[in-house]
Amino acid sequence: MHWRLSSVNASRLVEDVRAGRPRQDHRELSGFGSDLRPSVDLVCSEFRETFAGLRSVTVSGSGRGAAGIRVDDLGRDAIEGHLSCQVYEGLKDLDPRVLTDPGFWRYLAVWEMFEYVQWRDGRDCDLASFGAGANALTWDCVSRRMFVRGLIAYEARGDESWHSLARIAGTDVWRSHVLRVRTGESPILSSALLELWEKREIRTREVRDVAKRIKRLRSNVAFEIMDRSQIDSLLERQIEAIRRESWE
């Protein structure tokens, strides 16, 4: 069993909290399987504690944050990357039926992560950041976005270095050029693209153009069965083509 929220009730809760009205309990209990609420509660409690610690360090401007991260490295993007690892590790073993339930991600974003979502996407952020406002979730839903960010990094690396991949700062790159254009369906491809961007071997505009080319290639190329050397070669050809076109 797990908590979930419908799109309508999630929207209602967001509006109530923003208007200063008492928060009504519109949660729904989905009744299959064992009771997962205690384990999810623990993950969410640890999430809030870590977020509070990271945020206080950035405000105080002294020392190091959690996991030895330097204060001057911490921005909203960096904190989201750090917390994405925690969200993924905490939830990855849940029943797949829970992880594919849009209501579960709404519940997390609205009920458990409300303060973080508003801090991350802005106090006046769209309902989509909470997974609300529509029946289908978009990649703007912060809780789901963070989990999948960790999932892609873990599947791409499979060892301890996956944390560094998930923490590559650049939420817009993750959301717009990995998740939304299905690049994330190939973790190795996502990893290679993100590493090029982090090293500044490819400009932000070029990331957008490469993502578009990858989307067009998908009908003929199975990125999922390609190894890293093949992926690197493919990306190199796409980048060269983009730069050649810009010179013409």
Image: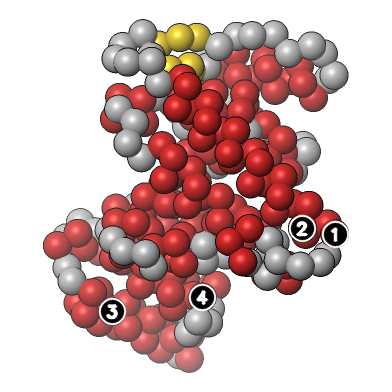
Tell me the SS state at disc 2: helix
Whether pointer 2 and pointer 1 mark residues with C-beta atoms closer than 8 Å, the reply is yes
Q: Residue at x 25, y 64 (%)?
A: 217
Cα separation between marks 4 and 1: 27 Å
Local secondary structure at mark 3: helix
Question: Where residue 57 is drawn, which disc sits there?
Answer: 2
Q: Is residue 141 above or below residue 66?
A: above
Q: Nearer the viewer, mark 4 or mark 2?
A: 2
Indicate the quadrant containing the N terminus: top left, top right, bottom left or bottom right.
Answer: top left
How much space separates mark 3 and mark 1, taking CA atoms?
A: 42 Å
Residue that appears at 66% across and 46% down: 51
* Residue 178, x across and y down, in percent: 42, 57
Q: Amino acid at mark 3?
A: Asp
Circle nearer the N terminus (3, 1): 1
Q: Amino acid at mark 1?
A: Ser
Mark 2 or 3, nearer chain start: 2
Q: Is residue 15 above or below residue 220?
A: above
Q: Secondary structure at mark 1?
A: helix
Residue ID for mark 3: 232
**30 versus 176 height, above or below:** above
The numbered mark, 4 or 2, whose residue comes first in the sequence reads 2
Residue position for label 4: 198
Please name the residue that numbered disc 1 is placed on: 60
Q: Are marks 3 and 1 in contact (CB under 8 Å)?
A: no
